[in-house]
Image (cartoon, grey):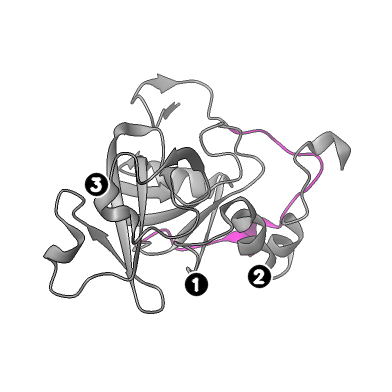
């Protein structure tokens, strides 16, 4: 039994599917699921939750009480200039609001980047010039992904996610639709092969 990330309701469906089309050696995907803040979660094909299908999640927090992250590759049609015109001049391309996850979708989290890949949360209620050292560019996310204590670790153990290092440019990518493939392709072995996994597994 698992807890739905968006509602907190318990369900018998773990949101995973067994794939007869691709099997990874579980030992090659083993990770230490402690201290994952600042790393990426990459959804594997066994994860069928539509909120997270082929997503790449940047972990903002991870500890004994749970984890919080932002989906990096779900741009919305809403231009950042509409709700947050003061921040739009710093918007990373594409200049839209991103869907950060199914939790608290009416709330926004802003990430600012300084230099090459130094990322921090910014206060969107303040003006961009209110900070001593302004960020170079920003990305704003509506909602986030959240896990209760031990939930993310269980999902990683079940093969729903793999944890990989974040590289400069991932968080502010200008090609969000290609991020899942790009992140997997730069890995080794079975993970790199997953980059070619078809959208429809029956076509494999």
Q: Secondary structure at mark 3?
A: loop
The C terminus lies in which quarter of the figure?
Answer: top right
- Of marks 3 and 2, the one in the foreground: 2
Q: Main secondary structure of the magenta part?
A: loop
Find out whether the residues at labels 3 and 2 contact each other: C-beta distance under 8 Å.
no
- Tell me the number on the disc at residue 186: 2
Q: Residue at x 78, y 36 (%)?
A: 200
Q: Is residue 106 left or right of residue 176?
A: left
Quadrant placement of the N terminus = top left
Can residue 61 be spotted in the picture?
no
Mark 3 to mark 2: distance in Å?
31 Å
The reply to whether callout 2 and callout 1 are in contact (CB within 8 Å) is yes
Q: In this view of the protein, which residue sits in the foreground, 66 or 1?
A: 66
In the image, which disc is placed on residue 167?
1
Write down the residue under mark 3.
65
Q: Bounds of the magenta span?
A: 16-34
Q: Earlier in the sequence, mark 3 or mark 2?
A: 3
Q: How far apart in space, not on screen, are marks 2 and 1 (Cα)?
A: 10 Å
Q: Percent from the top left, x then y, of residue 201?
A: 79, 38
> Residue at the location (14% across, 54% down)?
126
In the image, 61: left or right of 165? left
């Amino acid at each position: 039994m698992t807890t739905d990330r968006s509602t907190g309701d318990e369900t018998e469906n773990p949101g995973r599917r067994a794939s007869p089309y691709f099997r990874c050696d579980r030992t090659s995907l083993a990770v230490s699921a402690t201290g994952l803040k600042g790393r990426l979660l990459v959804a594997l094909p066994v994860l069928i939750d539509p909120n997270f299908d082929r997503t790449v999640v940047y972990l903002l927090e991870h500890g004994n009480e749970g984890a919080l992250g932002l989906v990096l590759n779900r741009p919305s049609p809403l231009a950042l200039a509409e709700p947050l015109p003061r921040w739009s001049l710093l918007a990373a391309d594409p200049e839209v609001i991103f869907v950060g996850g199914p939790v608290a979708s009416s709330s926004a989290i802003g990430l600012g980047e300084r230099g090459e890949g130094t990322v921090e949360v910014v206060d969107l209620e303040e003006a961009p010039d209110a900070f001593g050292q302004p960020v170079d560019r920003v990305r704003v996310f509506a909602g986030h992904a959240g896990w209760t204590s031990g939930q993310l670790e269980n999902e990683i153990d079940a093969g729903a996610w793999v944890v990989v290092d974040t590289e400069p440019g991932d968080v502010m990518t200008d090609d969000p639709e290609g991020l899942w493939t790009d992140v997997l392709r730069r890995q080794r072995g079975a993970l790199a092969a997953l980059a070619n996994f078809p959208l429809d597994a029956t076509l494999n």
